[in-house]
């Protein structure tokens, strides 16, 4: 037993080192790499990728995992949880024939370019054959990984959010459909007048940058273990609690874009920075799941960052930096502007209120695609119908319809629902935290570190040592319920 533990730990150490090198290279690629270096760089990445594959499929390593998995009940809790996770990740490589596995990876490598071109040219037909192949492979993957408990789409859902199946998601989305859809359609029906100083103005990037740096201090984002850069699409990338980096982008026509993307990514980053450092050397570092991760970013962005209490404290600083641009704009103008809700076509630009309805459309479609009830060729038609029904708008083109997201081109089916789930977790966690101390007071006192500390003790510190369900239970003392989320949205958007 000791021997196998040793082998496992030594290989893990080497894999971590290679992983870190690859991680730095990919961060660099997104933020710094000069265009002329990309080809040469790709050659080195290919060598490293092969080295990593060789390590991951090393016979002694696989044998060690297998033996430790068989004897998992003799391991300490931490190693046991880790081996269960690693074994689960290796299952696909073990079960899917090698040729099929490689063909699928090759297809996925090409598919995002095909999708991007199709989106650019508004040409769904050119993406359809690729999408059909991807769906066929994904259905195979779900077959290979099925268990007595999990079949079909449930296998995929569980990959992104352990323990969540169609049974739970159906109940969740049914509630949203009956409670939220009519509410949203009413709330978004009237016309609103917003200050033109906010909607039709120019906000220089260097001033936005200055305010962003101010925000990192407000949120106590630990810059000793962080980096803030720009990239085409904002993201968070962490490797261990010691190094968690974020990006943003400055859109000069929209003052709020960088503000809220930065707060969102800081929510992800603070989570990873606060994971117990002793997990860094294990495979249990980082966030517990997609849904829990998103619950943190969305709580920081929407529930804290878009609250009135927050801007009561920080609007003066924004006005100081944009003294010319925001002349005459009041706190209330700004608050209404950043919380405007409207029917829209694009998920990533949707507001807090309508966002979950965009996800509901995708969930229903995925479920039917994987079960075979819906054929890929009928996607655009179904998409338009569901958007009309749930969001109250109908896309004129597939570019702003079914082709807008990259996920399916990357083979990610079962990922979307975690976005909506994250917001719902956030509302429940917020409610529980508010019982321990008054969150609005903490925001008013500019004490966001108090919120960080509570989340650290209740959620962050555990990394991946607990399942999402266990974490929700620990932090809120009750199982997941969508009622807090629906109540929160209705309260906020009734005003
Ligand atoms: Zn996010």
Image: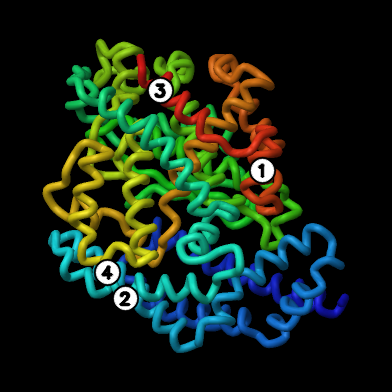
Q: Between tags 3 and 4, which lies in front?
A: 3
Task: Answer whether residue 265 is visible to the viewer in this image.
Answer: no
Are the residues tagged 3 and 4 within 8 Å (C-beta)?
no
Query: How far is the residue under mark 3 from the one under mark 2?
Result: 41 Å
The residue singled out by tag 3 in the image is 490
| Residue at image location 72% in from the left, 76% down from the top | 65
Spatial CA distance of label 1 from label 4 is 38 Å
Relative to 112, 416 lies left or right = right
Q: How is the image coloured?
A: rainbow
| First-in-chain label (3 vs 2) | 2
Q: State ligand 1's quadrant.
A: top left
Q: Is residue 490 left or right of residue 288?
A: left
- Circle 1 or circle 4, nearest the eye: 1
- The residue closer to the viewer here, 32 or 365, is 365
Spatial CA distance of label 1 from label 2 is 37 Å
Q: Mark 1 or 2 closer to N-term? A: 2
Measure the C-alpha gap from mark 3 to mark 4: 40 Å
Which residue occupies 59% across, 20% down?
439
Disc 4: which residue:
113
Residue underneath mark 1: 471
Q: Of the numbered discs in the image, which one, if any, rests on residue 133?
A: 2
Q: SS of the residue at dot 2?
A: helix
Let me know if residue 461 appears in the view.
yes
**Mark 2 crowdedness (10 Å alpha carbons): few <14, some 14-19, many ≥20:** some
Relative to the observer, which residue lies in front, 367 or 191?
A: 367
The quarter of the image holding the C terminus is: top left
Q: In the structure shown, which secondary structural element does the residue marked by tag 1 occupy?
A: helix
Position in image of residue 212 (x %, y %): 43, 33
Question: Which quadrant of the view contains residue 1?
Answer: bottom right
């Amino acid at each position: 037993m000791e021997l196998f533990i040793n082998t496992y730990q030594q290989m893990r150490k080497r894999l971590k080192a290679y992983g870190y090198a690859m991680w730095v290279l990919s961060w660099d690629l997104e933020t710094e790499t000069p265009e002329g270096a990309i080809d040469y760089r790709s050659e080195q990445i290919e060598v490293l990728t092969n080295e990593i594959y060789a390590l991951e499929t090393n016979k002694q390593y696989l044998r060690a995992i297998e033996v430790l998995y068989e004897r998992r009940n003799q391991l300490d809790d931490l190693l046991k949880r880790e081996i269960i996770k690693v074994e689960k990740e290796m299952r696909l490589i073990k079960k899917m024939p090698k040729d099929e596995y490689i063909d699928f990876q090759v297809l996925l490598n090409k598919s995002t370019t095909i999708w991007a071109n199709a989106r650019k040219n508004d040409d769904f037909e050119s993406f359809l054959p690729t999408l059909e192949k991807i769906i066929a492979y994904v259905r195979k993957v779900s077959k290979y990984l099925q268990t007595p408990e999990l079949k079909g789409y449930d296998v995929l859902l569980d990959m992104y959010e352990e323990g969540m199946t169609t049974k739970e998601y159906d109940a969740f989305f049914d509630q949203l459909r009956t409670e939220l859809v009519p509410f949203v359609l009413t709330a978004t029906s009237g016309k609103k007048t917003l200050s033109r100083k906010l909607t039709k103005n120019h906000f220089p990037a260097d001033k936005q940058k200055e305010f962003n740096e101010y925000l990192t201090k407000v949120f106590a984002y630990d810059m000793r273990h962080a980096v803030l850069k720009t990239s085409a699409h904002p993201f968070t990338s962490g490797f261990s609690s010691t190094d968690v980096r974020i990006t943003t982008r400055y859109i000069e026509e929209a003052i709020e874009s960088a503000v809220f993307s930065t707060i969102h990514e800081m929510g992800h980053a603070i989570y990873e920075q606060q994971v117990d450092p002793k997990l860094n050397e294990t495979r249990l570092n980082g966030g517990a799941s997609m849904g829990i991760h998103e619950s943190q970013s969305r709580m920081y962005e929407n529930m804290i960052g878009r609250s009135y209490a927050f801007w009561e404290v920080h609007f003066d600083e924004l006005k100081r930096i944009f003294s010319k641009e925001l002349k005459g704009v009041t706190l209330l103008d700004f608050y209404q502007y950043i919380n405007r809700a409207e029917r829209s076509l694009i998920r990533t630009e949707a507001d807090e209120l309508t966002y979950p309805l965009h996800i509901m459309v995708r969930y229903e479609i995925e479920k039917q695609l994987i079960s075979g009830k819906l054929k890929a060729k009928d996607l655009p038609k179904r998409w338009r119908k569901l958007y009309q029904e749930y969001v109250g708008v109908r896309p004129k083109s597939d570019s702003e319809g079914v082709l807008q997201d990259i996920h399916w081109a990357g083979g990610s089916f079962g990922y979307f629902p975690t976005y909506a789930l994250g917001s719902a977790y956030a509302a429940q966690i917020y409610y529980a935290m508010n019982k321990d101390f008054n969150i609005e007071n903490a925001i008013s006192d500019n004490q966001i570190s108090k919120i960080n500390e509570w989340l650290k003790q209740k959620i962050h510190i555990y990394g991946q040592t607990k399942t999402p369900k266990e974490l929700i239970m620990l932090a809120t003392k009750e199982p997941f319920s969508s009622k807090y989320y629906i109540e929160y949205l209705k309260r906020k958007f009734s005003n």
